[in-house]
Image (cartoon, rainbow, N blue to C red):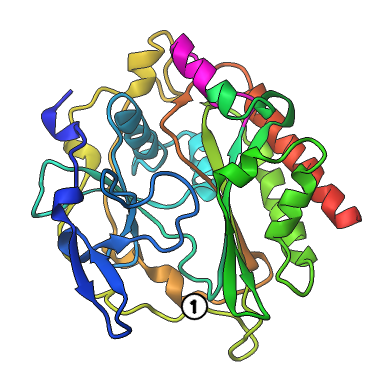
Amino acid sequence: MPADGQIMDLSRTLERENNMNGSVKQVLLDGCVPFSHQVAGHKCGINNTGVLQHPDGTILKQLQAPPRGPREMNFYTQVFAKDCTDKKLLDLQQHLPKFYGTWRPRESPHELYLKLEDVTRRFLRPCIMDVKIGRRSYDPFASKEKREEQINKYPLMEEIGFLLLGMRVYQIDSDSYITHDQFYGRSLGKDSIKNGLTRFFHNGQELRRHAVSLIISKIRNILRWTQLHFYASSLLLVYEGSPHTVNGSKHKPAEPGTEHQQGEPQSNSNNSYSHPYCQDVQHERNANGKCGGSVEEKDEEIGMGDKRQFGQEEAVEVKMIDFAHVFPSDNPDESYMYGLRNLLSTLEQILKD
């Protein structure tokens, strides 16, 4: 494993500056800032970089320590490879955030980040929820200690099939957000999980039934796609919380600083990681019979989401995220599909009530 794949502590690079309101804003490497819409995972702090937002509007996810980080990087690389001909993987692209290769900050070239689409960017008031999917949140190679740790975090995962990791919901009356973290999600049982999901779709005045319906449709499309096995992977659910319209359509204006390009975009074509599918499950290969791939970053596509306007289907987003534990298989992922079906069933019940 090359040395530049190792994770380094970014906390030493934190700088603080006051904005016009007198609050403190953290500015990281090359003008990047903490991603304001992060609802789950390790957030920016003393020992964590968290998810960052690049000045061009994309988000940056720091590569995790091996084997998780390289596995996730190569998963994105394979799915978005320019020469990919595997129809299954090409179909999968629509369910993932767009991948723009990897990125290294000029000040710390040994650190590596995944450069991804910010799927919340085109929303005025994005309501966001992160839902871990599957009956197991540990992969087949996890140690006994890791398995016990994950099971103890949420013993009902096996039965419910999904876990609410965090949510952020816009409230119309107060023009503010309410938030719930992973501890709230773990407090939900079989009898309260539906109420927990309902909170995500309530804006303080009414239940956003249309958003529920559109999200159900998108999850059904994901359920039709079965090939790889996903462990500890999530769905990111987003819908527009703002009631305001411009020319009859909700839209997200361009954010300042999109012209500011710092740091060095990196292609994955020169990385020397072996493909994790071959490394960890050596008897299986992808449909093309080869491993790896490359991604050519397209600057003209980055940040284009701010120019799109909302139609019926664009009022919501559902994306699969977090791929540090993805493995090939000849059989459908029953654990992941079980979680999707239970999530769908719960959402459908919300509409019926």
Q: Is residue 118 above or below residue 62?
A: below
337 horizontally vs 286: left or right: right
Q: Position of residue 230 (x, y in %)?
A: 53, 29
At 72% across and 58% down in the image, what residue appears?
A: 199
Q: How many marks?
A: 1
**Can you say which quadrant of the picture contains the C terminus?**
bottom right
**Can you say which quadrant of the picture contains the N terminus?**
top left
At 43% across and 23% down in the image, what residue appears?
A: 286
The magenta-colored residue range is: 134-149
117 horizontally vs 261: left or right: right
- Camera-side residue: 259 or 226? 259
Let me know if residue 250 appears in the view: yes
Q: Is residue 236 magenta?
A: no
At 70% across and 70% down in the image, what residue appears?
A: 203
Q: Position of residue 349 (x, y in %)?
A: 86, 48
* Main secondary structure of the magenta stretch: loop
- Camera-side residue: 143 or 214? 143
Let me know if residue 224 appears in the view: no
Q: Is residue 143 above or below residue 168?
A: above
In terms of image quadrants, where is residue 169?
bottom right
Amino acid residing under circle 1: Lys
At 50% across and 54% down in the image, what residue appears?
A: 39
Direction bottom: furthest residue: 247
- The residue that label 1 is drawn on is 252
Q: Position of residue 81 (x, y in %)?
A: 35, 40
